[in-house]
Image (cartoon, rainbow, N blue to C red):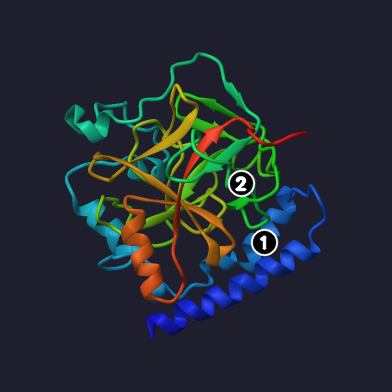
């Protein structure tokens, strides 16, 4: 059953992407009105039936929220729901190796990121780029074979993108869990989609919010200020689990979903799940600032 549902979604999404590519004019960016209309019609990424989503979860999002409410620890999501400011920043996961990984480059001013180049697992020092990061009309990001300028800015863990057409609504390049469990780990197939979002606090656990492009108008867990920029200009990501554990993310693109960019604690685990359900593999990639091979 899961196999057939996932396969049906894949075929539908491939059709939608083909139609969008054929119909969309060059250099088109959606306006806010266009984005809201897309949200009203529904994002094709969410056409996947819930039972087929590659997320291992127990209970619904609602039951997840109820479990949080019953717990002893107050989260930022709870405070936001009551109109309160976020909790004060705290030390993450007792300074563990995971919590100390991928520290962001320190800068008091935004660093311009004209383009984001995509390489394979061996990184920028080996071979030619696989492509470049591109904002799509479906409020997500994908791998593009054509040079695409994102004209983003990096500052203190946040990567903002003023060129998507969503600037006034969702200025950050963040990640949205399309359904269910926002816990990530090195053996988990749980995943999140790269999408325009509002800002989330540095070091914050996932925030449940409708203010993102994947399920606009409906609450989904998301994080945005989780980026780091290394001395070699590689962009890396560290997801903060609900218990405060910091988990280095692996980045991939999903050919069957229009080359959409996703993150997970384990590309291997996620890819095994998608292959077993007839959707093909998720390919691991690495992201770098700059436009190597991108001549404009």
Label 2 crowding class (10 Å Cα cut-off): few <14, some 14-19, many 20+? many
Residue 3 image-quadrant placement: bottom left
From mark 1 to mark 2, how far is it between C-alphas?
A: 26 Å
The residue shown at (44%, 60%) is: 282
Task: Pinpoint residue 133: horizontal percent, then vertical percent.
Answer: 60, 44
The residue shown at (70%, 61%) is: 37
Q: Is residue 29 above or below residue 13?
A: above
Q: Is residue 292 above or below residue 108?
A: below
Q: Nearer the viewer, residue 19 or 117?
A: 117
Q: Nearer the viewer, mark 1 or mark 2?
A: 2
Residue tagged 1 = 38
Task: Pinpoint residue 126: horizontal percent, then vertical percent.
Answer: 49, 38
Sequence order check, earlier mark of 1 and 2: 1
The residue shown at (39%, 43%) is: 82
Q: Quadrant of the C terminus?
A: top right
Q: Is residue 96 above or below residue 256?
A: above
Q: Are marks 1 and 2 in contact (CB under 8 Å)?
A: no
The residue shown at (53%, 59%) is: 215
Q: Is residue 111 visible?
A: yes
Task: Pinpoint residue 83: horizontal percent, then vertical percent.
Answer: 42, 39
Q: Quadrant of the N terminus?
A: bottom left
Q: Nearer the viewer, residue 222 or 292?
A: 292
Q: Is residue 277 left or right of residue 212?
A: left
Q: Secondary structure at mark 1?
A: helix
Q: Is residue 84 left or right of residue 109?
A: left
Q: Secondary structure at mark 2?
A: strand
Label 1 crowding class (10 Å Cα cut-off): few <14, some 14-19, many 20+? some
Q: Is residue 43 left or right of residue 30?
A: left
Residue tagged 2 = 131
Q: Is residue 180 visible?
A: no
- Count of residue discs: 2
């Amino acid at each position: 059953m899961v196999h057939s549902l996932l396969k049906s979604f894949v075929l539908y999404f491939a059709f939608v992407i083909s139609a969008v590519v054929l119909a969309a004019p060059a250099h088109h960016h959606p306006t806010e009105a266009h984005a809201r209309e897309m949200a009203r019609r529904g994002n094709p990424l969410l056409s996947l039936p819930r039972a087929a989503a590659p997320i291992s979860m127990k209970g619904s999002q609602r039951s997840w929220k109820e479990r949080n409410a019953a717990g002893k620890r107050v989260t930022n999501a709870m405070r936001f729901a009551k109109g309160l400011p976020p909790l004060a920043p705290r030390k993450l996961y007792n300074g563990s190796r995971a919590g100390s990984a991928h520290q962001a480059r320190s800068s008091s001013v935004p660093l311009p990121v004209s383009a984001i180049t995509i390489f394979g697992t061996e990184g920028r020092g080996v071979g030619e780029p696989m492509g470049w990061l591109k904002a799509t009309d479906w409020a997500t990001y994908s791998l593009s074979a054509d040079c695409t300028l994102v004209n983003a800015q990096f500052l203190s863990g946040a990567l903002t993108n003023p060129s998507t057409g969503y600037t006034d609504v969702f200025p950050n390049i963040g990640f949205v869990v399309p359904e269910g469990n926002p816990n990530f780990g090195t053996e988990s197939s749980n995943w999140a989609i790269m999408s325009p979002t509002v800002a989330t606090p540095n070091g914050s656990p996932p925030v449940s919010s409708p203010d993102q492009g994947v399920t606009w108008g409906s609450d989904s867990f998301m994080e945005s200020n989780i980026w780091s920029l290394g001395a070699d200009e590689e962009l890396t990501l560290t997801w903060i689990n609900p218990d405060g554990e910091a988990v280095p993310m692996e980045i991939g693109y999903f050919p069957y979903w229009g080359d959409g960019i996703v993150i997970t604690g384990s590309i291997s685990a996620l890819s095994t799940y998608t292959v077993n359900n007839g959707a093909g593999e998720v390919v691991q990639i690495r992201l770098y600032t700059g436009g190597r091979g991108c001549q404009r």
